Amino acid sequence: MKLADLSTKVGRFKETDVQRFFARLEEKADGPLVNGSRCIEWRGYTNEKGYGRIAMKGVGHIYCHRLMYELSHRRQLRFEDVVMHVCDNRLCVNPDHLDLGTVLMNNQDRASKGRSAASKRGGGFRLTEEKVAHIKMLLGEGLVTPGQIYRNFGITHRQLWGIRNGRSWAHVKYNDRDQAMLALWD
Ligand SMILES: [Zn+2]
């Protein structure tokens, strides 16, 4: 998708805010083609993890790639929805480079890959603070059961047990939504 083709259907956002968002996007002229188009990068504020973020009236702070996903698909994301970058460029908001990955959405394949990779390494699945925050949030808000976490995330029983009883990752809080929103499952 080209910058010029982007629609400005605003949904729950104020049109002036959406225009402000669009004014700070720039199509990368020399970047690689991904799904037939180049990255469209955010030129405004980025957090320490390198993700763009913007304040929208009536909504609050929102990650730019999530905002673009909502605008281009005309639907509001649920908190547990994870928007992933196909292009691995965190600044990119090109809708064609964004993929929705609900953690419970047919992740069997990915999970089994993760598990077999983990068992090959002889250790556990690689967890990060973001992933743990996401797991804690999903469990804490009753969005999923531990069994669903085990089946869909590709972590080991031992890792899940450690997270749940606080033996490991105790410093990661489940209500850190900001952190949990950054979880990328791949
Ligand atoms: Zn991109």
Image (cartoon, rainbow, N blue to C red):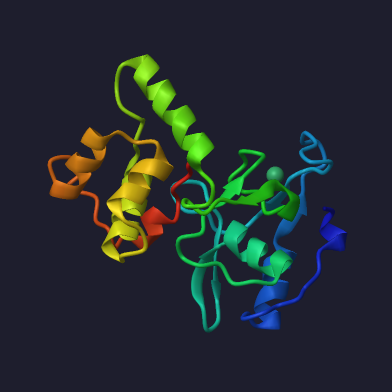
Looking at the picture, tell me which residue is in the foreground, 132 or 149.
Answer: 149
Q: Which residue is drawn at the image coordinates 50% and 67% (left, top)?
A: 78
Looking at the picture, tell me which residue is in the foreground, 79 or 9.
Answer: 79
| Residue 89 place in picture, x, y as percent | 62, 41
Q: Could one spot residue 186 in this view of the protein?
A: no
Looking at the picture, tell me which residue is in the foreground, 81 or 179.
Answer: 81
| Residue 184 place in picture, x, y as percent | 48, 44
Image region (quadrant) for ligand 1: top right
Q: Is residue 184 left or right of residue 93?
A: left
Q: Could one spot residue 78 in this view of the protein?
A: yes
Q: Which residue is drawn at the image coordinates 74% and 45% (left, top)?
A: 39
| Residue 30 place in picture, x, y as percent | 81, 36
Q: Which residue is drawn at the image coordinates 19% and 41% (left, top)?
A: 161
63 vs 117: above or below: below
Q: Is residue 166 left or right of residue 90?
A: left
Q: Which residue is drawn at the image coordinates 55% and 58% (left, top)?
A: 45
For the image, the number of numbered tags is 0
38 vs 62: above or below: above
Quadrant of residue 120 in the image? top left
138 vs 89: above or below: below
